[in-house]
Image (cartoon, grey):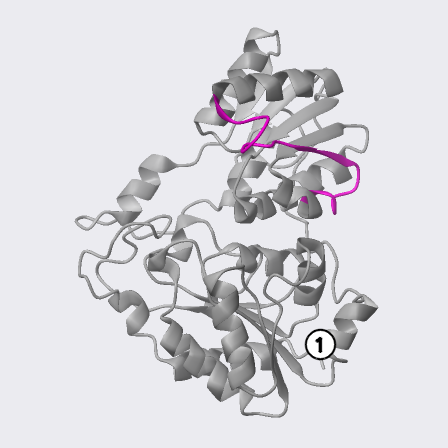
Amino acid sequence: MEQNSKKVNGYPKKLLVVRLSAIGDVAMTVPAIWSLVKNHPDVQVTFVSQGFARDIVNQIPGVLFVEANTKGRHKGLLGIWRLFTDLRKIDRYDALADLHNVIRSQILRNLFLLSGLKKISVINKGRSEKRKLVRLKNKRLAPLKTTPERYMDALLRLGYTINDEFDYLFREARLPENITIHLGYKDKRWIGIAPFAKHKGKIYPLDKMERVVEILSASKTNKIILIGGGGKEQEILEGWEKKYPNTISIARKYSILNELKIISNLDVMVCMDSANMHFASLVNTPVVSIWGATHPYAGFYGWKQNPTSAVQVDLYCRPCSIYGNKPCFRKDYACLNLIEPEVVVSKINTVIDRFNRI
């Protein structure tokens, strides 16, 4: 962070926080917002994001969540104006923290600036440093400031006391009865597997991940809990559920809050560079993350996760992308295909042994 946390007088008492997407990025704001409300219980924080973020933001005591319906009322330029007027009806803010810094949030914060709001802080995403990290020639391969730290810096600039003491929202949450009936009681090692991500450059080949499921499910001491979205993802995971013993898919079955509760009971979460890594980090569940086109050095590693739990290979071209959305210039996605399923399984067992919860 840019400065040591210390008491600063005259901080804004009514703060509007803007982070309109995506869900993993919203999850990464939690350590910063949690620290703010803990250190400043007199500050009213309003957090505006899309509806999917509600279950996460509502876990932070004292934070008011406001939904931005970016596909309906708040879509387009007129929609941003409506969002501005809707927020003005809710409260008169002393400051705004733009933790997104994209065109929509820029327009929104400028509307507040024109209305007389003077205290505005914007996240520095470190775009120049990231370009040097992903370029093919003269690559500067060094760890950058993490995204949660960048969020903290934006709040520090407004005069708040912010630190990195956040550990978790909850741990090993009690599961609702319907989930316990579905998953059973925890008498085995619960291994969560979330094999999907938004972009191909971040997805471990599904045939290799299926082999991981096959190996792990063969042991009666393991219960594999498959996590994913709807459509094709749900179809694939339910296929694995039918094919392998000791395997259950929860794809599209529960709310985000209940998924968080399930994740909090896992012995380990196996996932990509994706939202599920950040969900697990919020509930103190160790993560085995598999990295391809992207890299932990870009600053998106899970909050307080052990760096040695990442599975990745060293290639001259890695990382080639910050978000994993660029086509592989080699055409072979070697960064992912060179990772053998047995290596992933070995890492899973090592991490479970390190954080044994049974």
Up-down: is 350 above or below 34? below
Left or right: 153, with 161 as reference point? left
- Asked whether 73 falls inside the magenta stretch, the response is yes
Q: Position of residue 93 (x, y in %)?
A: 70, 18
| Residue 235 visible, this angle | yes
* Stretch in magenta: 57-76
- The front one of 191 and 176 is 176
The amino acid at mark 1 is: Leu
- Asked whether 225 falls inside the magenta stretch, the response is no
Left or right: 189, with 328 as reference point? right
Please tell me in which quadrant of the rendered image residue 48 appears. Answer: top right
Image quarter in which the N terminus is found: top right
- The front one of 271 and 10 is 271
- The front one of 330 and 137 is 330
Image quarter in which the C terminus is found: bottom right
Up-down: is 286 above or below 162? below
Q: Main secondary structure of the magenta part?
A: loop
Residue drawn at point x = 18 percent, y = 56 percent: 329
Residue drawn at point x = 45 percent, y = 32 percent: 124
Left or right: 253, with 59 as reference point? left
| Residue 91 visible, this angle | no
Q: Position of residue 98 (x, y in %)?
A: 55, 28
Residue drawn at point x = 30 percent, y = 55 percent: 319
For mark 1, give the secondary structure.
Answer: helix
Please tell me how crowded label 1 is: few (under 14), some (14-19), or many (20+) other residues with Cα within 10 Å: some
* Number of numbered labels in the structure image: 1
Q: Which residue is mark 1?
A: 183
Residue drawn at point x = 54 percent, y = 92 percent: 218
Q: Position of residue 299 (x, y in %)?
A: 45, 49
Up-down: is 328 above or below 25? below
Q: Position of residue 355 (x, y in %)?
A: 63, 75
